[in-house]
Image (cartoon, helix red, strand yellow):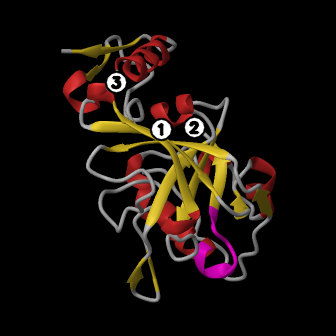
Amino acid sequence: MTSVPAPPPDLRCNVLVLPAGTELHRVHSRNRRAHEFNPGFGSSRFAPFTSAGIQVPTMYAATSFGCAAYESVFHDIDPAAVFKTVPLTKVEELAGSRIEIDRNLKLARLFEPDLNKWGITRQSLIDTPPSSYKSTRAWAQAIHDADSTLDGMIWTSRRFDEAKCLILFGTRVDESAIDVLSSDDFANTPDLLDRLVELGRLSHIVLTL
């Protein structure tokens, strides 16, 4: 297992302010609304986690559709695999959405210089395998609790480094502040599915029947 250092007790975050109206992209279960936070299901790098014993709802988003796709549909594909495939049945359970927030977002920066401030690197927090998720989630909890004005965190995508990933805290961002620009099921939107196919081709990933 990759060793993830524990967050320091006096954690202080560098902050990025994401302007109101910035378009964000999501790929999520078609059974969940585009502006709906995850109440605590699943297991990912920075969620779920609790604060004062209470589950913190979270929402992942990205600054481009490509990033949202690679951090969800293509997330678990081994880059070194000879055959890289994703079942179409998996994709058909998903939706692609565009959202924007109607206010500025105050986000903890998790870029390399900001991580270096804490004596760590991307390799020990962002680029770690799923076996380390329990430890990386401890960082999400520590960052959430370190500053009550933080709305979430932002970092450069591991799988699609042209763009950035975000996680928003449902304790700080209300669903009513999120405007849904579009939300379409892959199963019923051929153009959206075609875009996903083209993105997969960048890495020789094929959608299979």
**In the rendered structure, which disc, 1 or 3, sits on the residue that comes first in sequence?**
1
- In three-dimensional space, the C-alpha distance between marks 2 and 3, rounded to whole angstroms, equals 27 Å
Residue marked by disc 1 = 71
SS under mark 3: loop
Which of 198/142 is in front? Answer: 198
Residue 118 at x, y percent in the picture:
74, 65
- In three-dimensional space, the C-alpha distance between marks 2 and 1, rounded to whole angstroms, equals 8 Å
**In the rendered structure, which disc, 2 or 1, sits on the residue that comes first in sequence?**
1
User: Callout 1, which amino acid?
Assistant: Glu
Residue marked by disc 3 = 189
User: Callout 2, which amino acid?
Assistant: Arg
Q: Is residue 194 left or right of residue 3?
A: left
Q: Is residue 79 left or right of residue 177?
A: left
User: Callout 3, which amino acid?
Assistant: Thr
Residue 70 at x, y percent in the picture:
48, 31
As drawn, 4 above or below 62: below
Q: Is residue 82 left or right of residue 143?
A: left
Give me the residue at 58% from left, 48% from top: 126
Which span is picked out in magenta? Answer: 144-152
SS under mark 2: loop
